[in-house]
Image (tube, rainbow, N blue to C red):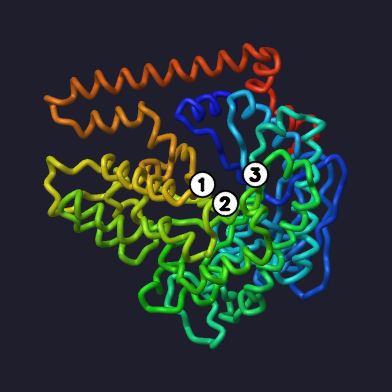
């Protein structure tokens, strides 16, 4: 962990986003309620320590636990001390951590990250406000207590995202019963019947999220210390998102689905839920942006010049940042964020021209084509546009360890770190340029390694025993001391 933070800090990154599930264990137990397949109320208790916790919601009737002998959905609880260790390590390197609740019991969105995939989301079907208040309130209580129990960890805390992509893909449901021609039918069960999306309104989603604002207001220590509540809302939760043939294929976080009407609805709700002063100090509205699922990304595969490539970026990606404040009705200096974006110009890395594994556009001169240059220009263009609009940016994701196909566009470490850049540049360089590439790249690698070593030594010199303990035993001890999962 300290090595990771040293590398992150040496790359110039000062804030990281830490996704966690709802299943966090504290010093005292708490109860989360649910519902079985027959509509009967159920509950589960999350006790101190790490353990396997049954989801209080039993999901698709095709997976009825009465016929399987056990509930299908389980979670491993994360001792809150583990999160505290992360904050302490981050503090040693001057890094702030945004805690993001990425998955909820029963699942609060459709998609592979929801925790119960491929089952349908059920969080919204019963006890949503009670469970949301319990889960978010417990975490805010703990965050608040750090201000006097562990000031060092508290100093590294940036804030909280109460729910990631709430009701994502609900917009696929057509209230008129029409078939939606998309390759993803998460709004329907195995029998083709409408399920969660048909029973949930966008007003229900926003009303539930608004509870986090009320909870945050009751923690003055968080507000006084400048901690942030970063409220993520996703356009795909709105039925109008998939209303036209032009965006019928856009089925994930994408600018394409962000119609002016949806943005206006989100902005109006946020202005009613918060005050202007709160929006300047701690209430941050967060909208994700990817162009990877834009229906026009196929045009990148046929670009002939860099200028043509940049013109497509200017048409598909950059307007999101330049027009976001106007569409939401959120002027400067009120706070906006984009807590997920990437450097990818296609959801399929094997057809993306910026992935390193995709093809070169056939009409693009071979001697002038460099996928890393195109990728870097996309990154820079997004940051410049976001900077002009004062939109805080968080890249998805920091490190993809094994999947080479995604490292070129989705792994910030592989994008910024000099060693992978050197290897890829060396492979693509001609015989004449390889010497210069090797010399300049090696210098960058040595400089980066020296910066990492310096930050590690600096952190350990402040608290050598604690630093070595966290490096070697910290996270493992946090689990084992509370009763490890066997």
Residue 320, percent from left and from top = 41, 59
Q: Quadrant of the C terminus?
A: top right
118 or 430, which is in the foreground?
430
Marks 2 and 1: CB-CB under 8 Å? yes
The image quarter in which residue 294 lies: bottom left
Marks 1 and 3: CB-CB under 8 Å? no
Q: Which residue is mark 2?
A: 335
407 or 397, which is in the foreground?
397
Task: Locate residue 207 relative to residue 138 in the image: left or right.
Answer: left
Query: Is tag 2's residue or tag 1's residue first in the polypeptide sequence?
Result: 2
Q: Which residue is mark 3?
A: 99
Viewer-side label of 2, 3: 2
Q: Which residue is mark 1?
A: 392
Q: CA distance from mark 2 to mark 3?
A: 18 Å
Report the residue at 30% width, 29% height from top. 423
Task: Locate residue 60 relative to residue 190 in the image: left or right.
Answer: right
- Classify mark 1: helix, strand or loop: strand
Report the residue at 52% width, 64% height from top. 328
Q: Quadrant of the N terminus?
A: top right
The residue carrying pointer 1 sits among few (fewer than 14), some (14 to 19) or many (20 or more) residues within 10 Å by Cα, namely some
């Amino acid at each position: 962990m300290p090595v990771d933070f040293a590398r992150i800090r040496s790359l110039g990154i000062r804030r990281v986003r830490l996704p966690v599930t709802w299943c966090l264990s504290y010093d005292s137990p708490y109860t989360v309620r649910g519902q079985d397949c027959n509509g009967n109320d159920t509950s589960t208790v999350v006790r101190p320590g790490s353990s396997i916790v049954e989801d209080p919601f039993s999901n698709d009737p095709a997976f009825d636990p009465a016929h399987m002998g056990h509930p299908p959905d389980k979670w491993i609880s994360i001792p809150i001390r583990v999160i505290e260790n992360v904050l302490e390590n981050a503090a040693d390197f001057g890094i702030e951590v945004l805690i993001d609740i990425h998955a909820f019991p029963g699942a609060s969105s459709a998609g592979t990250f929801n925790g119960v995939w491929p089952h349908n989301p059920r969080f919204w079907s019963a006890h949503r406000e009670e469970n949301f208040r319990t889960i978010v309130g417990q975490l805010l209580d703990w965050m608040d207590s750090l201000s006097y129990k562990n000031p060092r960890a508290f100093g590294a805390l940036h804030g909280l995202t109460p729910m990631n992509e709430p009701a994502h893909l609900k917009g696929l449901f057509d209230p008129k019963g029409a078939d939606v021609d998309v390759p993803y039918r998460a709004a329907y069960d195995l029998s083709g019947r409408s399920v969660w999306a048909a029973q949930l309104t966008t007003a229900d989603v926003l009303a539930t999220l608004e509870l986090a604002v009320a909870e945050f207001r009751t923690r003055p220590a968080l507000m006084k210390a400048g901690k942030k509540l970063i409220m993520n809302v996703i356009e795909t939760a709105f039925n109008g998102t998939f209303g036209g043939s032009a965006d019928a294929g856009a089925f994930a976080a994408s600018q394409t689905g962000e119609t002016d009407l949806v943005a206006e609805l989100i902005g109006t709700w946020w202005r009613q839920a918060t005050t202007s002063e709160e929006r300047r100090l701690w209430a941050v509205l967060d909208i994700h942006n990817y162009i990877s699922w834009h229906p026009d990304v196929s045009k990148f595969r046929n670009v002939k010049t860099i200028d043509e490539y940049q013109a497509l970026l200017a048409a598909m990606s950059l307007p999101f940042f330049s027009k976001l404040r106007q569409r939401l009705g959120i002027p400067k200096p009120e706070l906006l964020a984009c807590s997920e974006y990437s450097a990818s110009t296609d959801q399929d890395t094997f057809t993306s021209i910026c992935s390193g594994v995709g093809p070169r556009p056939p009409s693009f001169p071979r001697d002038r084509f460099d996928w890393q240059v195109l990728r870097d220009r996309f990154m820079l263009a997004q940051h410049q546009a976001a900077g002009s609009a004062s939109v805080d940016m968080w890249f998805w994701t920091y490190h993809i360890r094994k999947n080479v196909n995604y490292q070129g566009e989705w792994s910030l470490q592989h994008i910024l770190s000099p060693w992978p850049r050197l290897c890829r540049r060396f492979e693509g360089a001609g015989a004449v340029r390889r010497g210069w590439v090797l010399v300049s790249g090696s210098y960058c690698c040595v400089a980066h390694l020296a910066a990492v070593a310096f930050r590690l030594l600096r952190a350990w010199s402040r608290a050598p025993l604690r630093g070595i303990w966290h490096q070697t035993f910290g996270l493992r001890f946090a689990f084992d001391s509370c009763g490890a999962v066997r």
